[in-house]
Amino acid sequence: MTPAEPHVQLVRDATFARLDTTGGITGVRGTAPDGVFARDGRHLSRWQLTVDGSHPTVLVPASREDDHAASCVLIPKGTRDAPPAYTVFRRQSVAAGEFTEHLRLVNNRPDAVTARLELTVDCDFADLFELRADGRDYSKPDGGREVRTAPEGLVYDYRRADWHARTVLTCQPAPAGIAAAPDAGATARTLAWELALAEHGEAELHLAVRTDPSPSPSTRAARRTAPEAADDLARACERGLADIDLLTIAVEGVDGEQVRVPAAGIPWFLTLFGRDSLLTSYFLLPYRPGTAAATLSALAATQGARYDDFSGEQPGRIVHETRQGELAHFRQVPYGRYYGAVDATPLFLVLLHAHHETTGDPALASRLEQHARRAVDWMLADGGLGEHGYLVYTPDPNGLVNQNWKDSAGAICFTDGTQAKGPIAVCEAQGYAYDALVRTAELSEGVWGDPEYAARLRSAARELRQRFADDFWMPGPGFPALALDGDGRRVDALASDAGHLLWSGILDEDRARRVGRRLLEPDFFSGWAIRTLAAGQHPYHPLSYHRGSAWPHDNALIALGLARHGLHTELRTVTEGLTAAAAHHGHRLPEVLAGYARTTTPTPVPYPHSCSPQAWAAATPLALRTALRGVA
């Protein structure tokens, strides 16, 4: 944590804590909620320590020892002439469904003293969707919280119909007293201790919080000690791999086995995400092919099997997002298993083939053959290739208005800022579909022994490529349209999505090279990264989520495309910008960067609401390393 950051964040095994500089929790909501979180719920909403009747003075603010533990140094109030009698060394950590705290009190005086500590605790069991600052209000009929005293602490319970959540606090030594704290909330309690400290002596207090439901602990390989990285890209790769380890969670695979997959990011997305997990796994594929195998198995296990308008589930469709919280359980939000993504299904097929291509092992491709065929069926039928000629989506009133990676409202817009109306065919999804058809044809012929199916897929791919060339290319700017709207009009905003077309191979060589060079012109390239929307257009804003910001993973896909088409100068430029941006942030790339030009900002400006760490941003340096292979 840098001095500018008011919070410290800890994460391990699908559990994370967000604490203030004293190690406290206040129960704040909005864009940066604090607390202890597990399985999409907040299990501590207040955790405030007082010493000798007052808030402690911070000698050393909370800072991370590593990614799952932090420490700070506190003292009671004192003066220069009457220095504090003792010092409190506070250490906190998280593990799977656990938050632990160790307080060590050291007497600074040559005589015995008594330290009076009080800890005010509460648990609101808020669902992550409740904590967002988006103006929505979720009713909880018959939901009720209660708290009871236990011999060594407190037990909080929340019940609503068949939903039950619990938080248990255990203290060693047990508190001398527990009292209601109505000013802090109806279920808030204040625990009190009087700890005797001998002259220059010490005392300790151990606190353990356990959550239920609780994430599964993962089996972690011992982290290898590597020599110090030689350059900024290597350091960013090391940091990225460490962040992927932090974000790895245990989920169920296609045959009921436990697999470990990258969750999307903290604080909002510590869960399996179709698109995010697939692209993260693709970026890691040359270095950690097992991650791709685990992700494919987990997504095959959640592949759509029926029609459900609320969640967007359709047979063969790959899930966009999974959730385990209360609101998803009661279907107050559609995200328990939400399928509102136009691109996850073709990306599933792309990764399945890429895994076989990289490892040379046909076992996974054979095991998931029927899942792959169902994914192709979805693209040709419900996905829209058969009826519309393209993969399309219709805005979902219950979920996402836009269902590509730029999924914020208004992201798929014309140059005047007007949002396109559906069914919408975004350009990059057509590239993914083309690549998926070509790659699945190779699996069909080489692994499944079905050349007739392969021939049909290749024919469909050729036809899609030709349609795309005719319908999406805008002769005036010499650039692909961002999308086609429901009336077949070209959505003419100049957007970074076009760079994905270099990666997927749907553009011919001449157009691909024209697009690649165009993306490095100053209105697109900020000096740090390629912007989502070229500056100078009416909807451009450097702090817009998808209309002017710059996303590392977006740039990673573009970089792979630049390498594919031999645009090595442009590739080096993108790599240098991203690597320099990472170096300014401890070699960790945030999820999103603001679109400000490097010439006007000496350091890159993170987007205010970025997830960090975030999986596909963490994997971006590995994709850059792959893209640079063979480049002199």
Image (cartoon, grey):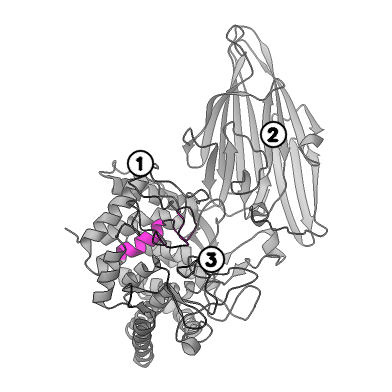
Q: Amino acid at mark 3?
A: Gly
The magenta stretch is 536-560
The answer to whether one can see residue 629 in this image is no
Residue at x 72% of width, y 49% of height? 166
How far is disc 2 from disc 3 in space, using C-alphas? 50 Å
User: In the displayed structure, would residue 589 be above or below residue 140?
Assistant: above
* Disc sitting over residue 602 in the figure: 1
Where residue 497 appears, as percent x and y from the top left, is 40, 68
Task: State the residue lying farthest toward the bottom.
Answer: 452
Rate crowding at label 1 as few (under 14), some (14 to 19) or many (20 or more) other CA atoms within 10 Å.
few
Residue under the image location 35 percent in, 84 percent down: 470
Q: Which of disc 3 and disc 2 is earlier in sequence?
A: 2
| Residue wearing tag 2 | 171
Q: In the displayed structure, would residue 380 be above or below residue 330?
A: below
Q: Amino acid at mark 1?
A: Pro
Q: Which residue is mark 3?
A: 410
Report the side of 116 relative to 555 (left or right).
Answer: right
Q: Quadrant of residue 478?
A: bottom left
Whether the magenta-drawn stretch holds residue 542 is answered as yes
Q: Main secondary structure of the magenta part?
A: loop
**Relative image position of residue 414 (x, y in whole percent):** 47, 70
